[in-house]
Image (cartoon, grey):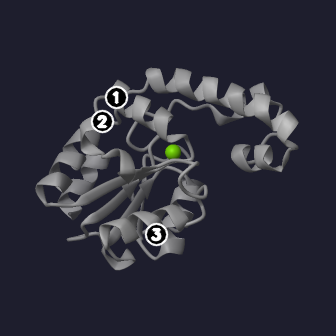
Amino acid sequence: MIRGRLHWIFDLDGTLTVAQHDFDAIRRQLGIAAGRPILETLEELPAGRAAPLYAHLDRIERDLAGRARAAPGAAELLSALRARGARMGILTRNRRPTARRTLDACGLSGWFADEDILGREEAPPKPDPGGIERLLARWRGTAADAVMVGDNRMDIAAGRAAGAAAVCVGARNGGDAAGADLWVQRLDQLLPEL
Ligand SMILES: [Mg+2]
């Protein structure tokens, strides 16, 4: 399914890093109802109410970013992909500077050019496939040669909507893997599939 594909797009938090975001706790801190999507909820608020909540979310995310650790097998997979000449990018619902800080904290920064990291200010949030399409256009790649890797159902949905292969990694909840072409517990379990 993913063999020979050379355009790889990763979710960041919980995929390349050890999951540490407690989204329910973040919702509580921001006063967002359980189960509601965080970014979309803020988007719907009047600007005056949303601004301090965005600032609060930014503080939460920057704090988490500074404590990020690489997911087991992440460096091995990225190294193997680079050796094969793959293009690699990140599509995150986080902000690009926070993504960079996260990569720095967990030693994965060297694998990704800034312009290959799309945050919520560079692309519509997943499950919208727009970010995947933008990276593929930049790389002159096709969805048939692309893989989207994530730990959340929104990552899988974005990958499928773009027409790429969708890989679910380390999902704590099997429901997140629904619709994925492949489901692994650790990123290095993808090595035999390359
Ligand atoms: Mg994630």
Q: Image quadrant of residue 7?
A: bottom left
Task: Determine if residue 185 is in view.
Answer: no
Tell me where residue 31 appears, x and y as whole percent: 83, 31
SS for tag 1? Answer: helix
The reply to whether dot 1 and dot 2 touch (C-beta < 8 Å) is yes
Please give the label number shown on residue 133.
3
The residue labelled by disc 1 is 104
Pointer 3 local density, CA inside 10 Å: few below 14, some 14–19, many at least 20: many
Q: In this view, does 137 lie above or below 38?
A: below
Residue at mark 1 to residue at mark 2: CA–CA distance: 5 Å
Mark 1 residue type = Asp
Mark 3 residue type = Glu
Pointer 1 local density, CA inside 10 Å: few below 14, some 14–19, many at least 20: some
Task: Determine if residue 122 is in view.
Answer: yes
Q: Which of 46 and 59 is in front in this view?
A: 46
Residue at point 35% right, 36% down? 71
Q: Is tag 1's residue or tag 2's residue first in the polypeptide sequence?
A: 1
Tell me where residue 170 appears, x and y as whole percent: 43, 46
Mark 2 residue type = Ser
Please give the label number shown on residue 109.
2
Q: Which of 150 and 9 is in front in this view?
A: 9
The reply to whether dot 2 and dot 3 touch (C-beta < 8 Å) is no
Tell me where residue 121 appears, x and y as whole percent: 58, 48
Q: Is residue 135 above or below residue 111?
A: below
Tell me where residue 37 appears, x and y as whole percent: 73, 48
